[in-house]
Amino acid sequence: MAKKIIGEILKQQREKKGLKADDVAAACYVTRSRYYQWEKASYIHIKNLPYLAEVLGLKLRYLRSVNGERDPATDPEQPPQVAAA
């Protein structure tokens, strides 16, 4: 099975929830044109993922993994950041 790119996942979830691109774009504080670019993309800037996760009902961790982001909580190459005391 081919690995899904994030844009395909966004489009499928948007359609599944019956949302218009305008709805998702507004919730993410971007234009409809920018959102459509995301649906065609294989990578989206990490700062936009929380908005997408919320409006589309997806877990942020899932979007980050599909987007190629490392999870510092589980990635041994990137130890978790410890807050300064």
Image (tube, helix red, strand yellow):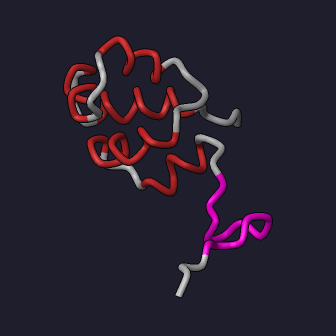
Q: Nearer the viewer, residue 61 or 79?
A: 79
Quadrant of the rendering where the N terminus is positioned: top right
Q: Nearer the viewer, residue 9 or 83?
A: 83
Q: On screen, 18 above or below 46?
A: above
Residue found at the far right of this picture? 77
- Residue occupying image coordinates x 37% and y 21%: 35
Residue found at the far front of this picture? 85
How many marks the image carries: the answer is: 0
- Residue occupying image coordinates x 60% and y 27%: 42
Is the stretch drawn in magenta largely helix, strand or loop? loop
Q: Position of residue 23 (x, y in %)?
A: 20, 27
Q: Left of 48 or right of it: where is 64?
A: right
Residue found at the far top of this picture? 33
Q: Is residue 79 magenta?
A: yes
Q: Quadrant of residue 30?
A: top left
Q: Left of 48 or right of it: where is 17?
A: left
Write the start and end of the magenta stretch as one range. Answer: 70-81
Q: Left of 53 or right of it: where is 72?
A: right
Q: Position of residue 72 (x, y in %)?
A: 64, 65
- Residue occupying image coordinates x 29% and y 17%: 31
Q: Position of residue 29 (x, y in %)?
A: 26, 30
- Residue occupying image coordinates x 50% and y 57%: 61
Residue found at the far bottom of this picture? 85
Q: On screen, 24 above or below 31?
A: below
Q: Is residue 14 magenta?
A: no
Q: Position of residue 46 (x, y in %)?
A: 51, 42
Q: On screen, 29 above or below 84?
A: above
Q: Left of 3 or right of it: where is 27?
A: left
